[in-house]
Amino acid sequence: MQVKINNNQSKNLCEIYNNDAYKYIDVLKKNNIIVNHIITDPPYNISQKNNFATMKNADRIGLDFGKWDWNFDLLNWINLYIPLLDKNGSVIIFCSYKFISDICRQLENNSITIKDILIWKKTNPMPRNTNRRYVQDMEFAIWGVNKKAKWIFNKPKELHYLRSVFETSIVSNNERFNHPTQKSLKLMKQIITIHTNENDTILDPFMGTGTTGVAAISLNRKFIGIELEKCYFDIAKKRLSQSCLI
């Protein structure tokens, strides 16, 4: 399924596809799609069985984030999508700390220069197994750019420098759309403001419920999103349609 969502200021501001990113890449390449940035939160491939199922009132069974997270191919999508980047393009990929080096290596094999590791520090993390391990209050994202790119870095003039740590709360109840790994809208707005310019096109091959797209549109960027799961796609479609009417 393909959906084009327009607003009054820009035609084709948003295009989203209910499809498998590994398969739909052929369509994008056939249509000669070129984007300024890839900003995405792919499955982390960290689902696993544990004894959480035996706990009373447990919010989730083990670490099962959904069938889309089991045995997900973490690396090969990078080979397919990097060729869509403009010569000055950038890529930001959220990932588990377990796979940072693997993803960095894959990006470098595709002529991407790694510039930094971004850190999302959650101000209100969900405690888990606190007597036996540290609270998991951080997630990571890899920022890379095409070799020889004139990359974008919008540092506020009033600041001497920017740290690569973004501190926001996890998604609150009034912002949550029943997705176990949904990112904060505030977080994505901050990242997009720094790493992209107005009217740039942002591609998210693993759109989820569309948070990156909502952030992009609110900041006058264009957005292309792909999502395999129909339930999440429908949520993203509704959210993005509402955003385009603002």
Image (cartoon, helix red, strand yellow):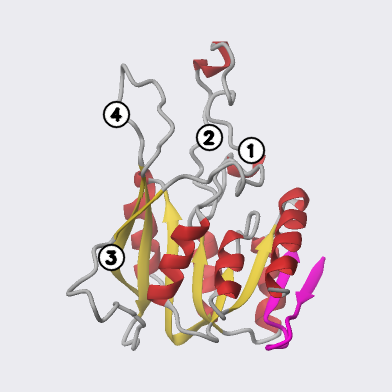
Residue that label 1 marks: 66
Q: Is the residue under label 3 in contact with that under label 2 (CB below 8 Å)?
A: no
Q: Is residue 75 magenta?
A: no
Q: Identify whether 214 is placed above or below 90.
A: above
Between circles 1 and 4, the one closer to the viewer is 4
Residue 142 seen by the camera: yes
First in residue order: circle 1 vs circle 4: 1
Work out how far the residue at label 1 is from the one at label 2, CA to CA, in angstroms: 8 Å
First in residue order: circle 4 vs circle 3: 3
Measuring 75% from the left and 68% from the top, which residue is drawn there? Answer: 241
Element on which disc 3 rests: strand
Q: Is residue 9 magenta?
A: yes
Work out how far the residue at label 2 is from the one at label 3, CA to CA, in angstroms: 26 Å
Residue that label 4 marks: 134
Between circles 4 and 3, the one closer to the viewer is 4
Quadrant of the rendered image containing residue 4: bottom right
Residue that label 2 marks: 47
Work out how far the residue at label 1 is from the one at label 3, CA to CA, in angstroms: 29 Å
Element on which disc 4 rests: loop
First in residue order: circle 1 vs circle 2: 2
Element on which disc 1 rests: loop
Between circles 4 and 2, the one closer to the viewer is 4
Q: Amino acid at mark 2?
A: Ser
Identify which residue, 188 or 51, lies in the foreground.
188
Q: Position of residue 118 (x, y in %)?
A: 33, 59
Tell me which segment is drawn in magenta: 1-19
Measuring 60% from the left and 67% from the top, which residue is drawn there? Answer: 213
Residue that label 3 marks: 116
Identify which residue, 150 or 246, lies in the foreground.
246
Element on which disc 2 rests: loop
Crowd around label 1: few <14 · some 14–19 · many ≥20 (10 Å): few
